[in-house]
Image: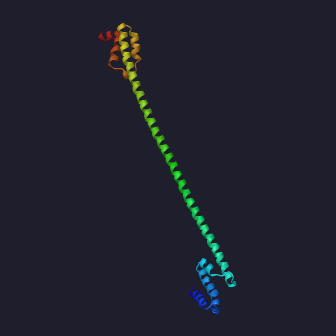
């Protein structure tokens, strides 16, 4: 760079200086070769004179290297954009998958909760039906005892006895036994003899 500057200054000071005139293209070629070797293709290109035969070969190499560098930059830029797009796509797919899985999980939990609620309601209804059935059996027993007592009072002992025997054994209490004895007075007479 200093040699090129020196030749140019010498040529300015003495325009007929042949050494400076021939030194400028040689120094430019050497400086451009050094810049090319260091990868500074733009500096190398700016130093070369297309009209000189010595510079054409290096200029062709510089232009080829510049095109290769531009193509490499385009590929890197394209790969960068493609990577970013792929990253966005993966993130989007994962986000959508997470939302869908979460929704399915919530639906499953809701269905499970609804099933448990229905099971509890069914158990409560069954328990209520069982309790009501027991109440009805007991009410039936109470009515049967009352009816049997009325039949005994009317003297219809066989009908009263049939009604008493139709009552389920689990509800038969002392009143049942008393009424049953009242339907068989001839046994009471035998016991007394």
Q: Residue furthest left?
A: 192
Of residue 166 and residue 45, the one placed in the foreground of this image is 45
Of residue 54 and residue 126, the one placed in the foreground of this image is 54
Q: Compared with residue 25, is residue 105 higher up or lower down, i.e. above or below?
A: above
Residue at 38 percent of width and 13 percent of height = 147
Q: Compared with residue 7, is residue 169 higher up or lower down, i.e. above or below?
A: above
Quarter of the figure with the C terminus: top left
Q: Compared with residue 138, is residue 150 higher up or lower down, i.e. above or below?
A: above
Of residue 191 and residue 37, the one placed in the foreground of this image is 37
Counting from the top left corner in percent of width and height, residue 43 is at: 59, 79
Counting from the top left corner in percent of width and height, residue 109 is at: 47, 43
Counting from the top left corner in percent of width and height, residue 67 is at: 64, 73
Residue at 63 percent of width and 74 percent of height = 66
Query: Is 20 situated left or right of 171 in this image?
Result: right
Residue at 43 percent of width and 33 percent of height = 123
Corner quadrant of residue 158 = top left
Quarter of the figure with the N terminus: bottom right
Counting from the top left corner in percent of width and height, residue 173 is at: 34, 20
Query: Is 171 situated left or right of 93 in this image?
Result: left
Corner quadrant of residue 116 = top left
Q: Compared with residue 16, is residue 34 higher up or lower down, i.e. above or below?
A: above
């Amino acid at each position: 760079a200093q040699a090129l500057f020196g030749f140019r200054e010498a040529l300015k000071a003495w325009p007929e200086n042949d050494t400076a005139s021939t030194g400028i293209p040689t120094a430019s070629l050497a400086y451009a070769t050094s810049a090319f070797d260091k990868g500074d293709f733009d500096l190398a290109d700016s130093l070369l004179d297309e009209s000189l035969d010595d510079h054409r070969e290096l200029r062709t190499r510089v232009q080829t290297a510049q095109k290769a560098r531009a193509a490499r930059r385009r590929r890197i830029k394209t790969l960068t954009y493609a990577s970013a797009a792929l990253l966005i796509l993966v993130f989007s797919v994962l986000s959508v998958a997470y939302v869908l899985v979460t929704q399915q999980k919530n639906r499953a939990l809701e269905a499970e909760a609804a099933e448990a609620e229905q099971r509890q309601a069914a158990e409560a209804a069954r328990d209520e039906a069982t309790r009501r059935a027991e109440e009805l059996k007991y009410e039936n027993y109470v009515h049967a005892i009352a009816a049997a007592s009325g039949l005994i009072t009317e003297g219809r002992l066989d009908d009263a006895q049939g009604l008493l025997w139709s009552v389920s054994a689990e509800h038969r209490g002392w009143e049942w036994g008393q009424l049953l004895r009242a339907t068989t007075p001839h046994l009471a007479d035998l016991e007394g003899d």
